């Protein structure tokens, strides 16, 4: 399908959490049991959480990370990009894809 259709079919928001030195495994474990999270993908320096409602999920994500004493950098919510669709399908970023500024 077209890029727009692929993004629409994904139908989830992407919450990006900058790790800011935090351990990716510990960060994923701290939020693994949160409802509404479809998938968590670790990338270099960040994790991407595929959620039903990004804005509603941020508070719970922050609370869980704080309870686990995990300090992270900026958190952003976005609609999925074509790179996000590729990342969800393959577990890796598109080659040469640039990170968008938050």
Image (tube, grey):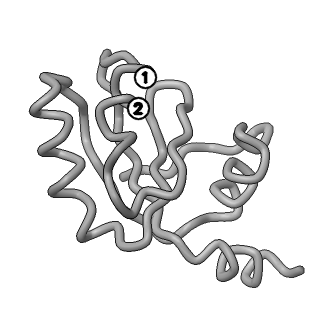
- Please give the residue where the numbered disc 1 appears in the rendered image: 24
- Residue 29, compared with residue 100, is above or below; it is above
Q: Residue at x 19, y 54 (%)?
A: 60
Q: Position of residue 81 (x, y in %)?
A: 61, 64
Q: Is 72 rendered above or below residue 77?
A: above
- Front: mark 2 or 1: 2
**Residue at left offset 34%, top offset 28%:** 27
Kindly identify which numbered label has been placed on residue 28.
2
| SS of the residue under disc 2 | helix
Dot 1, crowdedness within 10 Å: few (<14), some or many (≥20)? some
Left or right, 23 with reference to 69: right
Q: Residue at x 71, y 40 (%)?
A: 91
Name the residue located 76 percent from the left edge and 83 percent from the top edge.
Answer: 5
Residue 11 percent coordinates (x, y): 58, 77
**Position of residue 80 in the picture relative to residue 61 (left or right):** right
Circle 1 — which element? Answer: helix
Circles 2 and 1: CB atoms closer than 8 Å: yes
């Amino acid at each position: 399908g077209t890029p727009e259709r692929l993004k629409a079919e994904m139908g989830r928001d992407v919450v990006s959490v900058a790790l800011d030195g935090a351990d990716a495994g510990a960060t994923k474990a701290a939020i693994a049991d949160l409802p509404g999270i479809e998938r968590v993908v670790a990338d270099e320096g960040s994790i991407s959480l595929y959620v039903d409602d990004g804005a509603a999920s941020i508070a719970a994500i922050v609370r869980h990370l704080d309870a686990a004493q995990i300090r992270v950098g900026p958190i952003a919510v976005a609609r999925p990009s074509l790179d996000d669709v590729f990342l969800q399908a393959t577990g890796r970023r598109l080659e040469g894809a640039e990170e968008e500024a938050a």
